[in-house]
Image (cartoon, helix red, strand yellow):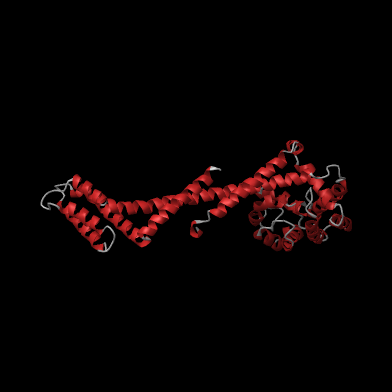
């Protein structure tokens, strides 16, 4: 059993003993005595040096006033009320003489019964903290084990894949589409106005699976309001590199151009067909259908029918009966390292998976046995 589990079990056992003791005392009595002891002791600690200083009569007066106030707030029926009275008596003996540190030591000794209550409450709080910390550590261990188990299960599934499956049946249509859409987008950004390109990108917000970042608001407004917005995107990027004196020959307001276009060069230069392309290995068949529907809707706005047809061909791959087998094979080829394959052949993945599942069951059982303090 690991350390957090041992700490949790030990804390629970100690809390049971503490609970039994508190049940005998009564929670209300425990808190009342512990609070009174805390206040009384605070006055002793705060005034001991002053009350024992023969030259600080004012300090002694304040000390007595504080003691009277604290003692007066302690109910007569409070358990161990007499301990506080006896401690106070020790500190009022011989008022005409100077108190000594020994008086304070004896007063603290008189408070021993009340101190036991305070220490019991303090110990309860400490053990509760240990309980919470140990349980939190076990929850983190559970999360780690779940992550590791999921990875082992993934490797096991990939290890069962047919690595000789003809994945080119998927790869070739996807590569053909990816190349074609990249070329089409590049042509679009060189031929169309920057205004048209940014409008297209802005409209993709209606297609959450096409993950373009919307154009900065000031940039989008600028290309709509300025004549330079009729220039191509590639031309805007060229102009953004011009000096102010040279730029003055090409745009009406160089300062406005710099504020809205030049400051967004990284965004403009980063626009590409990547959000429209298909990852390799591809996603699951159901997801592929949704991804391609949105891509077809966007690609159809700027690309040729041939490119759209290639997109439809990728969409239809998900309808193949062997799609998941081919996709799993492709994923295995991409994901499994030589080390992974060696571990799979040696049965290490299966053994580790069995161990992780057992450990996870054990941790879950311990957490169920020792619930959060509020439900304990």
Q: Position of residue 4 (x, y in %)?
A: 52, 45
State whether residue 241 appears in this view: no
Q: Going by the image, does 39 lie left or right of 214?
A: left
Q: Position of residue 318 (x, y in %)?
A: 84, 56
As drawn, which residue projects farthest toward the left? 96
Which image quarter holds the N terminus?
A: top right
Q: Residue at x 79, y 42 (%)?
A: 333
Q: Nearer the viewer, residue 50 or 374?
A: 374
State whether residue 188 appears in this view: yes
Q: Residue at x 86, y 45 (%)?
A: 165
Q: Position of residue 217 (x, y in %)?
A: 65, 60
Q: Nearer the viewer, residue 6 or 242?
A: 6
Q: Going by the image, does 188 lie left or right of 53?
A: right
Q: Nearer the viewer, residue 125 or 1?
A: 1
Count all numbered tags in the image, as a single digit: 0
User: Height in image: 257 above or below 153?
Assistant: below
Q: Position of residue 356 (x, y in %)?
A: 65, 45
Q: Nearer the viewer, residue 237 or 54?
A: 54
Q: Going by the image, does 304 lie left or right of 345?
A: right
Residue 288, located in which quarter of the rendered image?
bottom right
Q: Going by the image, does 4 lie left or right of 188?
A: left
């Amino acid at each position: 059993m690991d350390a957090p589990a041992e700490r949790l079990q030990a804390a629970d056992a100690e809390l049971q003993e503490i609970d039994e003791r508190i049940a005998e005392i009564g929670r209300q009595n425990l808190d009342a005595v512990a609070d009174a002891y805390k206040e009384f002791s605070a006055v002793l600690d705060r005034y001991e040096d002053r009350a024992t200083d023969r030259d600080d009569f004012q300090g002694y007066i304040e000390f007595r006033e504080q003691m009277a106030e604290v003692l007066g707030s302690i109910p007569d029926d409070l358990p161990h009320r007499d301990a506080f009275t006896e401690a106070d008596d020790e500190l009022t003996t011989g008022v005409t003489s100077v108190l000594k540190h020994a008086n304070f030591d004896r007063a603290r000794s008189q408070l021993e019964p009340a101190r036991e209550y305070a220490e019991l409450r303090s110990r309860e709080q400490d053990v509760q903290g240990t309980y919470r910390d140990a349980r939190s550590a076990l929850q983190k261990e559970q999360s780690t084990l779940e992550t590791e188990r999921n990875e082992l299960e993934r490797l096991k599934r990939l290890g069962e894949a047919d690595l000789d499956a003809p994945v080119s049946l998927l790869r070739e249509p996807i590569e053909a589409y990816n190349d074609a859409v990249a070329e089409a987008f590049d042509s679009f950004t060189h031929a169309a106005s920057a205004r048209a390109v940014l409008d297209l990108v802005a409209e993709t917000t209606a297609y959450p699976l096409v993950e373009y970042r919307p154009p900065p608001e000031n940039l989008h407004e600028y290309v709509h309001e300025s004549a330079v917005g009729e220039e191509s995107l590639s031309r805007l990027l060229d102009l953004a590199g011009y000096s102010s004196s040279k730029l003055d020959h090409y745009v009406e307001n160089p300062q406005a151009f710099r504020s809205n276009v030049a400051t967004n060069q990284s965004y403009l230069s980063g626009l590409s067909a990547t959000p429209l392309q298909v990852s390799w290995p591809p996603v699951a068949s159901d997801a592929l259908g949704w991804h391609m529907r949105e891509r077809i809707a966007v690609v159809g706005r700027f690309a040729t029918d041939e490119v759209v047809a290639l997109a439809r061909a990728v969409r239809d791959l998900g309808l193949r009966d062997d799609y998941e087998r081919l996709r799993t094979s492709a994923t295995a080829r991409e994901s499994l390292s030589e080390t992974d394959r060696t571990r799979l052949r040696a049965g290490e993945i299966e053994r580790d998976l069995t161990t992780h599942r057992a450990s996870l069951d054990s941790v879950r059982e311990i957490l169920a046995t020792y619930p959060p303090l509020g439900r304990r």
